[in-house]
Amino acid sequence: MDRQYVQFGCGMCAPATWKNFDAGPAFWLQSRFPFLTPLLVKRGFPDYPRNIQYGDVIKGLPVPPQSADAVYCSHVLEHMTLEEFRVAVRNVFNYLRPGGTFRLVLPDLEQLIKSYVNDPSPEASSRFMRETYLGETNLPRGLRAMPTALFGRARHLWMWDYKGIAEQLAEAGFTNIRRAQLGDSPDPRFSEVESEGRWTGCLGVDCKRP
């Protein structure tokens, strides 16, 4: 039986050995209206790899139940409301085969707060708002504003520390929950989707479907 590896919110990282999904507004526009791609790219939007499928993990990915050996996401879950996060995590649990791995990385709220508290400079609060993506320095206008206006996923909506997200994963049914580090999975396939820039200073978690 072929092993199936699923990544959602993949962005530009789409290895051929993974089934890659993205629900970003720019990708939605390109997937629905391909003729807009040259204009969007000219305006600074990415030219996405062709092996990405549009898929929203909250609404449900086209992945059969208990078919995936592993699911991965990087800097995706913090863009969901609390209830959306819970739906997404339950969906991931359903996609995994027994013994399958869910591995994720996202901003570490605890570390961001510690940095803010220990920063005596007048810029501390502004730096915290920028680094957490909880604030807006200005509102985008024109074509660049359209995807955000339509879908509203640029900001962070609910952030996590380890103990908080571990509790949520346990409530969804996951076991063997642990804090993860870049490259510490025994499955070498995760090296195809993990990158240092996405993990440095962030919160990684590894867990299993029993």
Image (cartoon, rainbow, N blue to C red):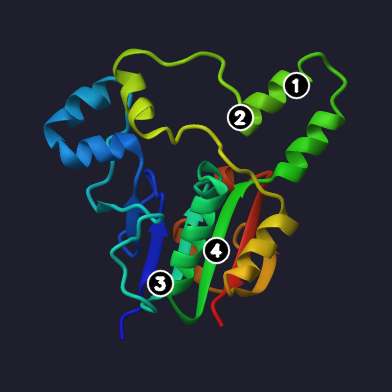
Q: Residue at (85%, 31%) from the top-left corner?
A: 117
Q: CA distance from mark 2 to mark 4?
A: 24 Å
Residue 86 locus on image (x, y percent): 53, 58
The answer to which of 7 and 141 lies nearer the viewer is 141
In space, the residues marked 2 and 1 are separated at their CA atoms by 11 Å
Spatial CA distance of label 3 from label 2 is 31 Å
What secondary structure is marked by label 3? Answer: helix
Q: Are marks 3 and 4 in contact (CB under 8 Å)?
A: no
Crowd around label 1: few <14 · some 14–19 · many ≥20 (10 Å): some
Q: Earlier in the sequence, mark 1 or mark 3?
A: 3
Q: Reading the chain from its start, which is encountered first: label 3 or label 2?
A: 3
Marks 1 and 3: CB-CB under 8 Å?
no
Apparent side of residue 203 relative to residue 124 in the rendered image (left or right): left
- The amino acid on which the numbered mark 3 sits, given as a three-letter code, is Tyr
Q: Which of the 4 image quarters holds residue 173?
A: bottom right
| Residue pointed to by mark 3 | 95
Q: Hey, which quadrant is residue 97 in on the image?
A: bottom left
Q: Position of residue 187 (x, y in %)?
A: 52, 73
Q: Mark 2 = which residue?
A: 134
Q: Nearer the viewer, mark 4 or mark 1?
A: 1
Q: Which residue is mark 4?
A: 103
Name the amino acid type tagged 1.
Ser
> For this view, does 200 lie left or right of residue 16?
right
In the shown orientation, is residue 70 left or right of residue 158? left
SS at circle 1: helix
Task: Looking at this view, name the residue that lies furthest to the left.
Answer: 35
Residue 71, percent across and down?
45, 65
Looking at the image, is mark 4 or mark 1 earlier in the sequence?
Answer: 4
Amino acid on which the number 4 mark rests in the picture = Arg
Q: Which residue is mark 1?
A: 125
| Crowd rating for badge 2 (residues with CA inside 10 Å; few <14, some 14–19, many 20+) | some
